[in-house]
Image (cartoon, rainbow, N blue to C red):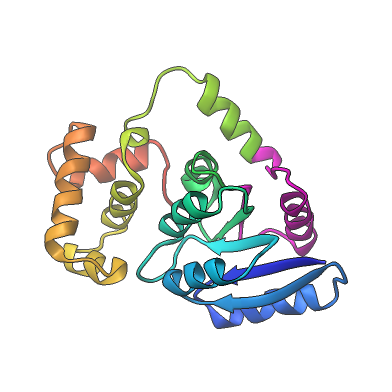
Amino acid sequence: MIKLLIADDHNIFRDGLKRIFADTPDIQVSAETGTGHEALELMRNEDWDTVLLDINLPGKTGLDVLKQIKKEKPYLPVLMLSMYPEEQYAIRTIKLGAAGYLSKDADAEELLVAIRKAASGGKYASRTLSEHLLHSLYGNGQQLHALLSDREYLVFRHIVAGKSLTEIAQTLALSIKTISTYRARLLEKMGMANNAELIRYALEYQLFD
């Protein structure tokens, strides 16, 4: 029996996952949560076979939680599940130690295959993710956004989506000053002067839908 911890901030989505696993005799949802902080507490208090972790969690993001899990329990398999397309976050999460990455529009059978593979100590990558990983390893040159830290990349995404610094601060539960610092750093790393240049760059590389 695979003992599964689910961390996702949407109750309806978690309910849907539990219905899928209810018909699966070898996977049991032993706990669920909607926050990163509680996910870490649950991770520490019990032994798990796999964690199914959403990127977009309030407070501590899924990336933050993944990093902490890998520090405290490096051999605990973590599957990332997100509404964001693979090309946006998959490679980052794999490099941080995730056992795999699935978009939320993946079908149920693919999810079950990924969980079973992760629980057995393997890594799961879809065909398109495998292509992205190969390109990341052997592609020519390094794109500017690859220089950004995970937090900087997250702020970059919100800026491109048209959010103000205040809105980004509220979404990420950080101060406006901190968000301003991240913005200044990412502009410096990418050699750009303002938000308009960031947006043009994102459009050129088709980073965000």
Q: Please, is residue 127 above or below residue 16 in the view?
A: above
Task: Specify whether residue 125 is painted magenta.
Answer: yes
The number of numbered discs placed on residues in the rendered structure image is: 0
Measured as percent of width and height from the top left, residue 8 is found at 53, 71
Tell me which residue sits at (32%, 31%) in the image: 144
- Residue at figure coordinates x 78%, y 55% from the top left: 116
Quadrant location of the N terminus in the rendered image: bottom right
Magenta region includes residue 29 = no
Q: Which residues are magenta?
A: 99-128
Q: Is residue 60 left or right of residue 89?
A: left
> Where's residue 205, x and y in %?
40, 36
Outermost residue to the right = 25
Residue 11's quadrant in the figure? Answer: bottom right
Question: Is 111 displayed left or right of 99 in the figure?
Answer: right
Query: What x and y, as percent, mark residue 77?
Result: 64, 52
Left or right side of 123 for 148: left
Q: Is residue 14 above or below residue 80?
A: below
| Residue in the image at 47% along x and 46% along y | 88
- Between 189 and 158, the residue placed more toward the observer is 189
The answer to which of 157 and 179 lies nearer the viewer is: 179
